[in-house]
Image (spheres, rainbow, N blue to C red):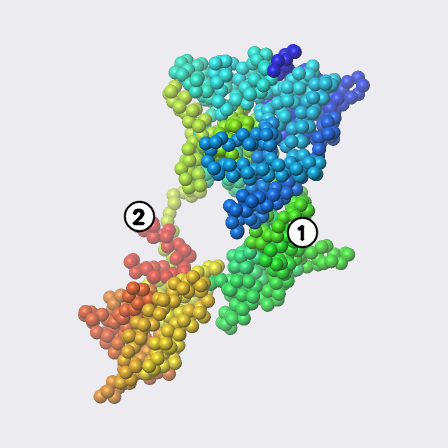
């Protein structure tokens, strides 16, 4: 549109310190003294800025430029705070209705979604829960904000969005979007309210009209704006038209050829400036330029690099000085290396007095990694993003409680609550953690108990006396745990509010029960409901994060009462969705009243870093999809639909971020452009701007240097001297500490992996079973052993005619007693029945009744070797099965020893070589009469029964094999003397307990491989 007189617009070269230049021009053109009538504040002048962080930075720029001189400063106001009358005394049209609260809007939208016929049809039975609906409500709210920000009336525009040739599901989408075109506007009219963005746009435009009708008699500047949406363009035009008004841009290119300027795509850094100038009818020749570029060669470089496609042809022509001085690359292999290298750069900057450094990135994952890496050096970076509310300790505690109840107190979910620092259960946090650890050691390690608190009580009652011994009490010192029965009572009382809910409940009831449970779990000793006592669990709401969380729950409980009843399983997801996007700035900046944030090291998002300048800046996460972001049209409309409605293209956002990229690259002395070759495990594409920059410079035989931080990173965790591999452990405990008792199965371990014996019996280390341990092969083996043991005990001799029914019943009972999950039980049951059929076939002779044989199962072994250097040595054990035979015509009884294996049994040659000697030693001990209740007899057969239940249900493997060159007597005869030699050897204090000393003969299972650092010294040995 035309103007009666030229508008007051200026631009500052992007390589100049923008805010400092604004301050210098304000001081030159306006001054800092009050008028003759003593006016101050807004009457002395006002500067509008895009956001609060820029407002603070501009105030700091005034202090920096004034350098201690007294001055009367202008009012500095973020345009988003237009309703803050204390900051910006505007007289606005009072007919603009007040805005609705964000939570109120989302709750009403969620209710409308749940009632929509299309949603009910598509979502199905489980889709209509609040945890899934709340994000949809947020998406609808964002659609309305986007439309109002760009002046689009959805009621008028949406019916035109779908052309006849569009897919049918878009018609259904439009039907669903009647929520925002009809239902929601009707509610706003009824409540006499307006949308948040609509009110902001209306207020800004009303103020712009007021400025046009009644120009203020004080200076009014607007500085640093890029995006003219949301009524900002109207306000900027009004300010520029004022006699004492001024609009100041950063880095507006007044020298670009008009031909190229008129063809700028929306992804270009200057596209938003062109959009505003075209709207206001301003010629770039009329724009004043304040200052001279500090880095003209760099500005010239980026002007040519970022030319639109129409101007690429000039890359082959002389373009003047384009030296990329002060710019370097950081091409990291992955995000972790990128974060570590960036942290090292910032650490280097922090070591240089007076120099400032910042990471600018839209990638929050990268920012979090860098912040964590900086803590390694004791640097707490000032992170502009703050702390997400959902990740504050109290919010995490509440979500974990909801997860635990939904998971029916599965071990991992329950311990996550009980070990949280806020958990105290009416005592001290230390005692609660000690009790939780005791509960973990006693009940939660290994296969999970049955679901629910009742399952924990049943598991506690079923504990055997040997399992009651607690070997981990020292880890809890100085705190001592409660008795588990008392601890479970406290837990049940604390969780009662949530457990007492019906299958579905109103959302406020769910939230109230959650808060009551959380407060009881967080209650500490001394809290109560008396007048002089703090309320139980009050520490949940302490501090800035506790206050914000409290206010959030008040809003949720106030506005969600009209939603349909919801299941408890939706609670945790609803909490997470409702807190999305809510942050607390500065939350972790202080600890104990001491400021932690480093004054010169910062982390910024792209918007927050706008207009700021640093000595060193790292532009991180320069990968397609991150910076620039993916050009997505949103969940509700396709790209053609957005165009038909009148909404801006998704590429417009890329243009804004391109401007921020160029401005950041020009405004700082040292610039590091960082990207990762892989992100989240997948290949990543460098940002298009990096590709353009590299292509332009390569055409001039210029290569950007790689920052040395990548070399620093590779050396970060390297030893100061030459790395030397660790030697295999060779512990030599004194003789009194060496074990004098081993089980028969551990004798083979003493040969194959002596270090395991040392760790278990000398150090007393016992591995903890994993939480929620799955039913593994060992459990399958226990079921098989139990069923066969019951059968043999019940019928040690001749089996009855209905033996098949009895054996099958024993296998079923053993499986049921194992309490494995139903799916696994269904998988195992037919396999177990196949094993039963195979055993019946093997034991057919029992039903004939002609053989005189008695079978003994799970027979205890106790034998003492005397006369060893260290004293008597005791061997214990238990044999799976021993058959005693009385062969007709022979007076002597002979024995047969069977060992059941559901896995792979040892091979015959391993037994012959002595590496798997259990069966041979059992035969030797049987000859010595070492088995309880059995006479001393010779053994004439050893065998493994491989019982898998698979395609081949069972297989008997005789030891030694038929084709072996040795007899059973050759193996059993010297067995005890060989054992004596082995034990005598380890009675020598100089004999070490080595880890896996025999190459190729590693012990099949070992819990101490990591303790022995096998992977380290074995790898060194391989080299």
Residue 722: image x %, image y %? 38, 43
Residue 464: image x %, image y %? 50, 72
- Residue designated by label 1: 539
Distance from the alpha carbon under mark 1 to that under mark 2: 57 Å
- Residue designated by label 2: 1023
Residue 583: image x %, image y %? 61, 40
> With 920 as the anchor, is 98 left or right in this view?
right
Q: Is residue 942 above or below residue 886?
A: above
Residue 206: image x %, image y %? 69, 25
Between 1001 and 563, which is closer to the camera in this rendering?
563
Between 207 and 612, which is closer to the camera in this rendering?
207
Instruction: Name the element at disc 1.
Output: helix
Between 353 and 453, which is closer to the camera in this rendering?
453
* Comparing labels 1 and 2, the label whose residue is closer to the camera: 1
In the picture as drawn, the residue positioned furthest to the right comes out as 37
Q: Residue at x 64, y 55 (%)?
A: 513
């Amino acid at each position: 549109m035309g103007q009666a007189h030229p508008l007051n617009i200026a631009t500052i070269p992007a390589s100049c310190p923008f805010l400092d230049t604004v301050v210098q021009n304000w001081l030159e053109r306006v001054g800092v003294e009050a008028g003759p009538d003593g006016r101050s504040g807004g009457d002395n002048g006002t500067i509008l800025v895009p956001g609060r962080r820029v407002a603070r930075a501009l105030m700091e720029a005034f202090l920096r430029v004034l350098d201690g001189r007294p001055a009367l400063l202008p009012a500095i106001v973020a345009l988003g705070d237009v309703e803050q009358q204390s900051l910006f005394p505007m007289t606005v049209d009072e007919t603009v209705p007040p805005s609705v609260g964000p939570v109120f809007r989302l709750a009403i939208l969620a209710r409308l979604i749940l009632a929509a016929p299309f949603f009910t049809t598509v979502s199905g039975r489980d889709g209509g829960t609040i945890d899934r609906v709340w994000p949809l409500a947020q998406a609808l709210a964002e659609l309305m904000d986007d439309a109002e920000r760009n002046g689009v009336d959805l009621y008028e525009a949406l019916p035109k969005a779908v052309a006849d040739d569009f897919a049918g599901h878009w018609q259904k989408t439009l039907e669903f979007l009647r929520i925002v075109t009809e239902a929601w506007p009707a509610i706003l009219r009824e409540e006499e309210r307006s949308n948040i963005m609509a009110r902001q746009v209306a207020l800004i435009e009303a103020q712009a009209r007021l400025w046009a009708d009644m120009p203020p008699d004080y200076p009014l500047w607007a500085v640093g704006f890029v995006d003219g949406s949301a009524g900002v363009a109207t306000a900027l035009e009004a300010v520029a038209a004022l006699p004492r008004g001024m609009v100041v841009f950063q880095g507006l290119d007044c020298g670009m050829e008009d031909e190229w300027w008129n063809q700028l795509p929306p992804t270009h850094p200057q596209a938003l400036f062109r959009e505003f100038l075209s709207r206001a009818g301003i010629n770039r020749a009329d724009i004043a330029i304040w200052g001279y570029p500090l880095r003209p060669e760099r500005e010239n470089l980026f002007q040519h690099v970022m030319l639109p496609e129409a101007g690429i042809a000039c890359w082959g022509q002389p373009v003047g000085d384009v030296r990329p001085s002060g710019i370097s690359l950081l091409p990291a292999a992955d995000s972790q290396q990128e974060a570590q290298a960036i942290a090292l750069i910032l650490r280097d900057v922090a070591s240089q007095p007076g120099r400032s450094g910042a990471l600018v990135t839209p990638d929050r994952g990268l920012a979090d990694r860098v912040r964590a890496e900086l803590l390694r050096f004791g640097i707490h970076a000032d992170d502009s993003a703050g702390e997400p509310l959902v990740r504050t300790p109290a919010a995490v505690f509440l979500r974990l409680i909801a997860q635990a109840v939904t998971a029916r107190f599965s071990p991992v979910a329950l311990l996550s609550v009980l070990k949280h620092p806020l958990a105290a259960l009416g005592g001290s946090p230390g005692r609660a953690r000690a009790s939780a650890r005791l509960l973990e050691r006693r009940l939660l390690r290994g296969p999970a108990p049955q679901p629910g608190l009742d399952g924990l009580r049943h598991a506690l009652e079923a504990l055997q006396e040997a399992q009651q011994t607690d070997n981990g009490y020292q880890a809890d010192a100085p705190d001592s745990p409660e008795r588990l029965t008392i601890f479970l009572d406290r837990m049940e009382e604390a969780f009662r509010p949530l457990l007492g809910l019906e299958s579905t409940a109103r959302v406020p009831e769910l939230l109230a029960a959650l808060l009551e449970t959380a407060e009881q779990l967080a209650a500490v000793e001394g809290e109560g409901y008396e007048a002089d006592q703090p309320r139980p669990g009050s520490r949940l709401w302490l501090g800035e994060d506790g206050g914000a969380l409290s206010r959030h729950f008040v809003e949720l409980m106030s506005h969600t009462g009209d939603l349909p009843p919801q299941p408890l399983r939706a609670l945790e997801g609803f909490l997470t969705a409702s807190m999305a996007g809510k942050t607390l700035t500065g939350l972790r900046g202080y600890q104990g009243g001491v400021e932690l944030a480093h004054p010169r090291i910062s982390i910024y998002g792209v918007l927050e870093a706008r207009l700021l300048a640093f000595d060193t800046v790292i532009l991180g996460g320069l990968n397609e999809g991150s910076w620039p972001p993916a050009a997505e049209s949103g969940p509700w409309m396709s790209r053609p639909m957005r165009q038909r409605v009148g909404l801006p293209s998704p590429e417009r956002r890329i243009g804004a971020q391109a401007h921020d990229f160029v401005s950041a690259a020009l405004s700082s002395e040292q610039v590091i452009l960082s990207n990762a070759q892989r992100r989240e495990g997948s290949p990543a594409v460098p940002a298009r701007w990096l590709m353009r920059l590299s292509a332009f410079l390569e055409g001039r035989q210029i290569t950007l240097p790689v920052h040395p931080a990548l070399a620093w990173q590779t050396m970060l965790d390297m030893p100061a001297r030459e790395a030397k591999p660790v030697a295999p452990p060779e512990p030599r405990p004194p003789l009194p500490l060496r074990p004098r008792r081993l089980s028969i199965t551990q004798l083979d371990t003493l040969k194959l992996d002596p270090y395991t014996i040392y760790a278990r019996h000398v150090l007393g280390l016992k591995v903890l079973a994993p939480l929620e341990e799955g039913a593994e092969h060992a459990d399958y083996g226990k079921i098989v052993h139990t069923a066969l043991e019951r059968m043999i005990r019940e019928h040690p001799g001749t089996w009855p005619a209905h033996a098949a029914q009895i054996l099958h019943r024993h296998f079923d009972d053993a499986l049921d007693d194992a309490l494995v999950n139903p799916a696994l039980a269904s998988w195992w049951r037919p396999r177990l029945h196949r094993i039963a059929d195979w055993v019946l076939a093997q034991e057919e002779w029992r039903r004939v009744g002609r053989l005189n044989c008695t079978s003994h199962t799970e027979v205890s072994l106790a034998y003492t070797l005397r006369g060893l250097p260290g004293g008597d040595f005791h061997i214990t054990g238990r044999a799976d099965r021993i058959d005693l035979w009385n062969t007709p015509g022979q007076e002597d009884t002979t024995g047969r020893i069977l060992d059941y294996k559901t896995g792979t049994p040892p091979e015959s040659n391993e037994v012959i070589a002595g590496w798997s000697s259990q069966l041979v030693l059992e035969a030797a001990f049987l000859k010595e009469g070492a088995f309880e209740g059995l006479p001393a007899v010779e053994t004439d057969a050893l065998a493994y029964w491989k019982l898998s239940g698979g395609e081949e249900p069972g297989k008997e493997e005789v030891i030694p094999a038929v084709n072996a060159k040795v007899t059973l007597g050759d193996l059993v005869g010297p067995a005890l003397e060989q054992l004596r030699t082995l034990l005598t050897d380890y009675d020598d204090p100089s004999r070490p307990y080595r880890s896996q000393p025999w190459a190729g003969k590693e012990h099949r299972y070992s819990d101490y491989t990591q303790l022995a650092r096998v992977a380290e010294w074995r790898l060194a040995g391989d080299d």
